[in-house]
């Protein structure tokens, strides 16, 4: 299978399992929040889901792709700008964002979507070791690894923002 065929397959899996989340009004708001560098929370979350699927396939971990995608997309569903200390009402612990945003993301995700226990574990534990309690399932471990990889690449400026629209076109394979 060529690299392009693999990318297309990953994109199809993202569309299949992430459609509800990617097109939800609240998730689309994450375009307005910067994660690292010039990367929006929306694009960071899509990148983490993509990377998690790739890691799962590389390791032959046999994870639930549905839960992997949904948990990865929602892992940073905190819906505030964490760079603005105390000015965003959602950022209740501005200096400790890394420790507290998983709980906020889980609260928001529970409010807006029906989650499985694995999806909840992914969201709640993706910041391990900051969250102290380690992930309990393979899916959560893989999203944690994918998030660390993507965050590092974004912070170092090695992974630049590419999504220039307010949504991912779910009707074709546009980038």
Image (cartoon, rainbow, N blue to C red):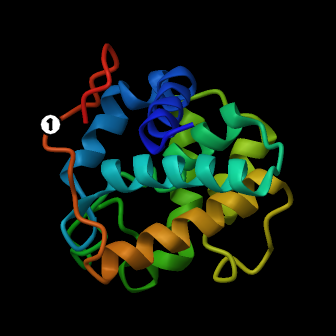
Residue 102 lies in quadrant: bottom right
Residue occupying image coordinates x 14% and y 36%: 165
User: Viewer-proximal residue, 41 or 61?
Assistant: 61
Q: Is residue 122 left or right of residue 118?
A: left
- For the C terminus, which image quadrant? top left
- The crowd level at tag 1 (other Cα within 10 Å; few <14, some 14-19, many 20+) is few
| As drawn, 158 above or below 48 | below
Residue occupying image coordinates x 36% and y 67%: 91
Residue occupying image coordinates x 30% and y 68%: 159
| As drawn, 88 above or below 42 | below
User: Viewer-proximal residue, 45 or 87?
Assistant: 45
| As drawn, 98 above or below 140 | below
- For the N terminus, which image quadrant? top right
Where is residue 64 shown, x and y percent of the image? 77, 36
| As drawn, 136 above or below 74 | below
Residue 152 lies in quadrant: bottom left
Q: Which residue is mark 1?
A: 165
Residue occupying image coordinates x 18% and y 35%: 166
User: Viewer-proximal residue, 106 or 31?
Assistant: 31
Where is residue 48 shown, x and y percent of the image? 49, 55
Q: Is residue 141 left or right of residue 45?
A: right
SS class of the residue under badge 1?
A: loop
Where is residue 45 shown, x and y percent of the image? 43, 51
Furthest residue in direction top, as rendered: 171
| Number of numbered labels in the structure image | 1
User: Viewer-proximal residue, 29 or 175?
Assistant: 175
Furthest residue in direction left, as rendered: 164
């Amino acid at each position: 299978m060529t690299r392009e065929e693999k990318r297309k397959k990953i994109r199809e899996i993202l569309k299949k399992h992430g459609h509800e989340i990617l097109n939800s009004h609240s998730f689309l708001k994450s375009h307005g929040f910067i994660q690292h560098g010039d990367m929006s929370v929306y694009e960071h979350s899509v990148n983490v889901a993509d990377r998690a699927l790739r890691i799962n396939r590389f390791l032959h971990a046999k994870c639930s792709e549905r839960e992997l995608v949904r948990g990865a997309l929602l892992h940073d569903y905190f819906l505030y700008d964490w760079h603005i200390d105390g000015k965003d009402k959602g950022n209740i612990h501005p200096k400790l964002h890394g420790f507290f945003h998983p709980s906020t993301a889980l609260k928001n995700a529970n409010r807006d979507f029906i989650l499985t226990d694995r999806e909840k574990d992914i969201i709640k534990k993706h910041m391990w070791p900051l969250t102290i309690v380690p992930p309990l399932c393979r899916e959560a471990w893989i999203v944690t690894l994918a998030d660390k990889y993507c965050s590092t690449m974004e912070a170092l400026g090695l992974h630049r923002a590419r999504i220039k629209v307010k949504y991912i076109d779910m009707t074709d394979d546009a980038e």
